[in-house]
Amino acid sequence: MNEELAALQETFQRRGFQVEICENIAQAAKVVHEMIDKVTPAPTIGFGNSMTVKSAGLQESLAQVAKDTYIHALVGTAESDKKALTADFYLTSANAVSMDGHIVNIDGNGNRTAATCFGPKQVIYLIGKNKITQTLDEAMQRAKKAAVLNAKRYNKKTPCAVTGKCENCLSPDCVCSVTTIHRKKPLGVQMTLIFIDEEAGL
């Protein structure tokens, strides 16, 4: 096992998280299905707008076993996001994690940050090794850089989409409205971190 991932596993287990280590994204998808496929009655599943989860094909494959799936919509109403807050499972990724035990996420409308704090019965993170930093400060910087890339990807009219770096803006299109830092598993929710020994997502 990758020594860095083994150390992360120990750190986050001490903080109350369930932790799985996978060699690749295909194995991570298999682990998710092992967690969900046998749940009865068929569960409801919410999804954050995660490139990692999408690349694992989980939105499509889990739709075959779920009662309902709630997928984040980039445009339109937030009805699906509201339903995701009370889903049996919520799948997403993180903008960054640190070796000292923090998970950092930055959101524009707060759907993902809300769902990973309170609401769903169980949250499952899929996290590529490219998301790993040494310290919380480095995790914050990485999350901000990911937000810049997302602003460009979504064609947002923000200063960062032009300059390529965070300008600490208050633009109507700002994708950095809410920042969360998990230093321990929240009370009342099961939370599993699946670390992937390959790069995945932004």
Image (cartoon, rainbow, N blue to C red):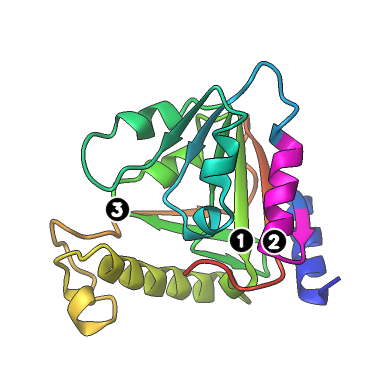
Q: In the figure, residue 33 lies in which quadrant?
A: top right
> Spatial distance from mark 3 to mark 1, Cα to Cα?
20 Å
User: Which amino acid type corresponds to the residue marked 1 in the rendered image?
Assistant: Ile
Residue at which label 3 appears: 108
- Of the numbered discs 3 and 2, the one sitting upstream in the chain is 3
Residue at which label 2 appears: 195
Q: Position of residue 163 (x, y in %)?
A: 21, 83
Answer yes or no: do the residues labelled 1 and 2 have beta carbons within 8 Å? yes
Q: Which residue is drawn at 22% across and 74% down?
A: 161
Kindly give the residue lying farthest to the top in the view shown. 41
Q: Where is residue 46 in the image (x, y as percent from the top left)?
A: 49, 35
Q: Where is residue 85 in the image (x, y as percent from the top left)?
A: 45, 30
- Of the numbered discs 3 and 1, the one sitting upstream in the chain is 3
| Quadrant for the N terminus in the image | bottom right
Per the rendered image, the range of residues in magenta is 20-35
Residue 31, above or below 88 = below
Q: Is residue 34 magenta?
A: yes
Residue at which label 1 appears: 127
User: Which amino acid type corresponds to the residue marked 3 in the rendered image?
Assistant: Gly
- The majority secondary structure of the magenta stretch comes to helix
Q: Which residue is drawn at 30% across and 67% down?
A: 153
| Mark 2 residue element | strand
